[in-house]
Image (cartoon, helix red, strand yellow):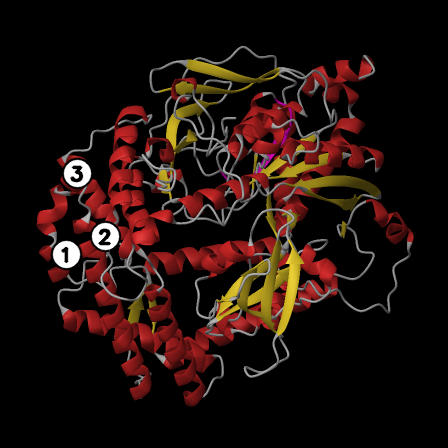
Amino acid sequence: MKKQMLMLAVAAAMSVLSAHVVTAQPEKVQLTTAQNAAQPGTGPLKPSAAQTQAALWASRVLARYHYKALPLDDAMSAKIYDNYFKTLDSEKLYFTQADVDQFAPARTKFDDAINNEDLTLPFQIYNVYQQRFNDRMAYARELVQKGGFDFTANESLQIDREKAPWAKNEDEARDLWRKRVKNDWLRLKLAGKDDKGIKETLDKRYEGYQNRLKKLNNEDVFQMFMNAYATAIEPHTNYLGPRSAENFDIMMRLSLDGIGAVLQSREDYTVIREIVPGGPADKSGKLKVGDRIVGVAQGNGSFTDVMGWRIDDVVQLVRGERNSTVRLDVLPADAGQDGKHVTIPLVRQKISMEEQSAKKQIIEVKEGGVKRRIGIVSLPTFYQDFEARRKGDKDFKSATRDVQRILGELKKEKVDNVLIDLRNNGGGSLIEAVELTGLFIDKGPVVQQRTAEGRIDVESDTQAGLAWDGPMGVLINRGSASASEIFAAAIQDYGRGIVIGEPSFGKGTVQTLINLDRFSQSDKTKYGELKMTIAQFFRINGGTTQLRGVTPDIKLPVTSDAENFGESSYDNALPWVQIKPATYLPSGDLKELVSPLQKRHDARVAKDKEFRDIEQDIAEALKLRKDNLISLNEAVRRKERENQEAKARLRESRLADAQEPGKADEPVAGPGSKEQRAKAPNPTAPKKSNVALKGAPRSDDGLQGDERSLAAEIAAEKAAKNAKDVYLQEAAHILADEAGMLKADTRMASRTMPYLSMMKQAGN
């Protein structure tokens, strides 16, 4: 079956090349082109014959079948050259101008390198990068050992160097790194660390950078180079090596065959980061968070020592075919480095990634003595298990099926309105976007696609009936892209629901996976896959979300910077165009509702101190981004930190006072919450712990994630997850206002939602 997705979707013209689903067979699906590769860290990396062949076949497919097909010539070579250097050193911290000048003659040679099956040139560039990287880290560690920074000088550090010139020479490059190390030291000092602790932390940090680079192999370099080529054509075209392709497939189906544990690298150990409920690791009762895996064995085979391994290599050993056995050599979390190891056998099973599945909650909004119940459906991605669906599995994993089930539950709980939360949902299956829309409309077109040849196809919902026939809304932000934009745009064009938030990402292109292995002369040689743009999608009203995204009906404060995030930030994005509208029957016309809802929203947030806090944070972040400088003077930074901490304490105090049990607008978690709602408020109960705003800046401890204790890292993530979501609360208020207006004015309801009124009269 073709993988259809926004980031996948098929085109009939490409059916001969389109990808099949990659099954989870980790012992067979390896980075096979690395079989002849230089081992990581053993010397200069070189391309394999399989990689040169894969590059040639990829270039032929891209030049012929891409939606924006461009020849592989000198002009394209120059774009690849610029992209490749940007991939390796986007902040211009490692190469010098002399390095760039040295490779200037290569600017128009990458097309020849690919066509002649000789990738020596991009590997030479990478090997110089690797040397420069090691030089910079060695100098940084030298500075750390010397210490003695002058924090009274009025120096500053440029935050974003993407548009800065290359360092003119080694002296200028070293001065850049002196300032970076000085800033790292100052951050730790302001957080309360002493000089000895700072030295230990930073030396270990920079050594860790070096060790991670040593673990890169020629497959990593090849993938970076091929992505420099692919994205030079258009931003959403990518090359996926065999392992990346497998991980992409796992992301789409939200399942894999394994032990049910999330792994993380910490120093040289592979650590258990999380145990998935109901998985083999959980059921065994033998593994716990913090345990360290030091060896992996297949069945009754011998152990492979995985100390110091890359995390993805360890994951490949731990994953495997369903019902097969893997044995783990584990150093328990509470044991020292010389502690007693334990051997834990586990039988691999299918693991569902429920954390990425659709979730629900109910927010109760009380205003003017009336309580409204708003059902929230959070959807992180448009997922589908394509292979299971192809095989006829009645229980295949699907975003639409999960949301349909949730809507049924929300109906039973008698919610007044439903909000689909698509914030930071980057897309997924095109099929799911169409079918999810079908839960809220009866029948009709959902999205139009135009191929490179100009053929226009319409994807429609063909299933009669609605899973939810009441009012609804969609919450989006700049991170809502692709399939999310198809759904939000269709809901808006049909007049079916209110779209709330900020303008979406602006990705209006369709991709498919092309399996390059079909061109291989050997079953053992794997070429990888191309995720390639093959069409552009259009709204049913004839417009497109490309570049402009979906404009919400009710606008919330914009939290992102369009110049640096979103389709408009790419210099080679496709332009905005328009085609003829599709033929469709709107469900209603909500324009009459928008103005009064906007006025109520404006009046409410004008009095809301938390919204003022958010706007202040946004303004400060934008100013910092515009200034692009941070002071290296301790007195200046300490005063800035004290001001930020005082502001944070004031906000936390205010939130703590407001978050007493029984207070309106508290989220209610699911069906079992009826008893909770029946309980009277207890004035002596402790304050709730989520005394922070979601997305609010936190106090800087100067550390990186793996430098904190695992317990501290998990606690911070939990606190962030439980923080008060002001945008979600306000979206619930808006939909509560809408529900109240429709119930109070039946004539308005019939004018704005005539189609739904007819459905109710017909008993549907």
Region in magenta: 495-503
Give me the C-alpha separation between circle 1 and circle 2.
9 Å
Q: Amino acid at mark 1?
A: Val
Can you identify the residue that label 2 sits on?
85
Circles 1, 2 touching at the beta carbon (< 8 Å): yes
Q: Amino acid at mark 3?
A: Asp
Q: Position of residue 275 (x, y in %)?
A: 66, 60
Q: Which mark is residue 111?
A: 3
Near mark 3 (Cα within 10 A), the count class, few <14, some 14-19 or many ≥20, is many
Give the side of residue 467 with respect to residue 427, left or right: right
Q: Earlier in the sequence, mark 3 or mark 2?
A: 2
Mark closer to the observer (3, 2): 3
Taking the spot 54% from the left edge, 32% from the top edge, the residue there is 429
Q: Is residue 65 above or below residue 599?
A: above
Q: Is residue 692 visible?
A: no
Does the magenta run of residues contain 335?
Answer: no
Mark closer to the observer (1, 3): 3
Residue nearer the viewer, 354 or 703: 354
Taking the spot 53% from the left edge, 73% from the top edge, the residue there is 708
Near mark 2 (Cα within 10 A), the count class, few <14, some 14-19 or many ≥20, is some
Q: Is residue 268 above or below residue 542?
A: below
Give me the C-alpha separation between circle 1 and circle 3.
19 Å
Q: Is residue 587 visible?
A: yes
Can you identify the residue that label 1 sits on?
100
Q: Amino acid at mark 2?
A: Phe
Locate residue 712: give its quadrant.
Answer: bottom right
